[in-house]
Image (tube, grey):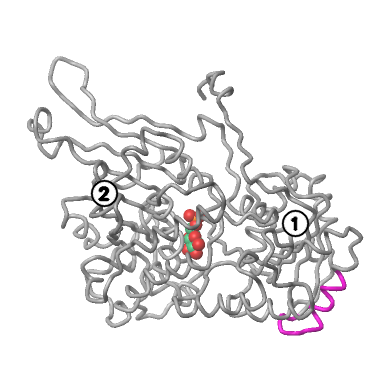
Amino acid sequence: MEQADPLDELLTCRFEFGRKVVEPCAIVIFGASGDLTARKLIPAFYHLCREKQLPTPFRIIGFARREKTDEAWCQELRAALEQFSRTKPIDDAVWAEFATNVSYCQGDISDPSAYKKLADRLASFSNDKLRRNLLFYLATSPSQFGEVVEHLHQTGLLRKEVAAEPDQRVVVEKPFGHDLASAHKLNAELTRFAHEKQIFRIDHYLGKETVQNILMFRFSNSIFEQLWNRQSVDHVQITVSEKLGVGTRGGYYEEAGALRDMVQNHLLQVLSLVAMEPPVTLEAESIRDEKVKLLKSIRPMLASQVDANVVRGQYTAGEMDGQPRPAYRHEPKVKPDSTVETYVAMRLLVDNWRWSNVPFYLRTGKNLPQSASEVRVQFRRTPHVLFAAQCGPKLDANAVTLRLQPNEGISLRFNGKVPGTSMEIRPVRMHFSYDSEFGAYTPEAYERLLLEAIAGDATLFIRRDEVETAWSIVDPIRQAWEARSLGGKEFYPAGTWGPVAADELLAQRGHAWRNPQPIT
Ligand code: BG6
């Protein structure tokens, strides 16, 4: 690792703008026996406890149907932590402290008496804040959201509060609906009993350091922001590729597909941060206003335009790292004639002053050769004189790549003279790596998100109009696809970069996908 310049330390600006203080809080997890609790929530709470970031005091209550004692639940959680913790071994002293604050409440989600039991448990806390400052985490199926908030409301645990900093908050997981109409319905159900300010919709991409850094990179550096527009940018590529197939999640995936699972949320979130206008302030609503404005300026697609702008794909059998991979249609719980897409590539146009006519290419897929997420801002070519006149299209254009994961970092690509007596020019790279600059620091997205939800800061959560606008972008695509089955050109072998049609989509405008740099 390079030595930091002491001046960099002096110039580190710690801003606490609007940063909310975490106050004693009781957290209730609905769906406490589920996968999300074991894999993400408990490891995140444990690490927050280890870093002394949780409020003092705090309580976590798991709510689920199965009968079990507090001790039995704690044992399950400890086993899950051994498996899923990002740091090992588990610190016994931290665990012991954590576990004393954790308890289990058995109950059926549709049984009013279970909520009464929960209310009694909360009322038994001696600390006044613990009785009032409540975070309800709905790690359940979205079809149960409405029912849970209604019961919470009827039991007096959830009041619809208009206050700027409401005491009671509800965190909901994705998928938030499966189209605009269902998202609308969910929103209506939730907002009957809770104010929009009390609803925290999760998109875990917003909890990633590198995704948060997009705004800092753009709005704290004048050299890049000057170029961030149609005059300088030729096009933008956003890639979220995954080596994994759908594995055991076939049942869920059959209902979702890549468009709903990844594009509607994660990719559109990244796009909105990359392309939005500067917010007026750093307050949650200013930032979210700009994100919504950006999403609203994405050119709507008519069904007849989908084929020209969007490519879907589904993986067939193939190979990854020398190992065979089954076809999607042969994965467990997948229909043998499924038309669900495991890959999407699309061209979006943002009809606003800054981005008019600049294509934004988005792609995501399972069983691709690499797991990597990145944003590549490809700048325009130099005029066709001097070196460009000599080299033609071989002279590469500049690009800034924001590598979101893994090998988090930012690269600037430009051309340089190859040393020697011959006249050769080739692209070179200036690279900033998080690891070498700051040392390995890889908190899970959930740690940040849970902390923000406890503090009541909604900046990193999705607002109602945001989620609905995102659905209105993808719905026409889904509808166009539903009208026809998959064609031969839409299949790709596992372990390749998706259907050939995705390359053709870019070639139409003289562009080509730049695949993420392999991890070295
Ligand atoms: C989830 C999707 O939201 O994001 C998964 O449901 C996907 O299908 C995952 O694998 C990707 O997240 P990450 O953080 O691994 O990039």
Q: Earlier in the sequence, mark 2 or mark 1?
A: 1
Left or right of 511? Residue 410 is right
Left or right of 504? Residue 7 is right
Between 180 and 478, the residue placed more toward the observer is 180
Residue hosting label 1: 78
Residue 477: percent from the left, percent from the top? 32, 73
- The answer to which image quadrant residue 343 occupies is bottom left
Magenta span? 108-121
Q: Is residue 479 above or below residue 1?
A: below
Q: Is residue 377 above or below residue 73?
A: above
**What is the three-letter code of the residue carrying label 2?**
His
Residue 54: percent from the left, percent from the top? 75, 49
Between 415 and 190, the residue placed more toward the observer is 190
For the C terminus, the quadrant is top left
Residue hosting label 2: 235
Label 1 CB-ligand 1 distance < 8 A: no
Image point (29%, 62%), residue name: 346
- The answer to which image quadrant residue 457 occupies is bottom right
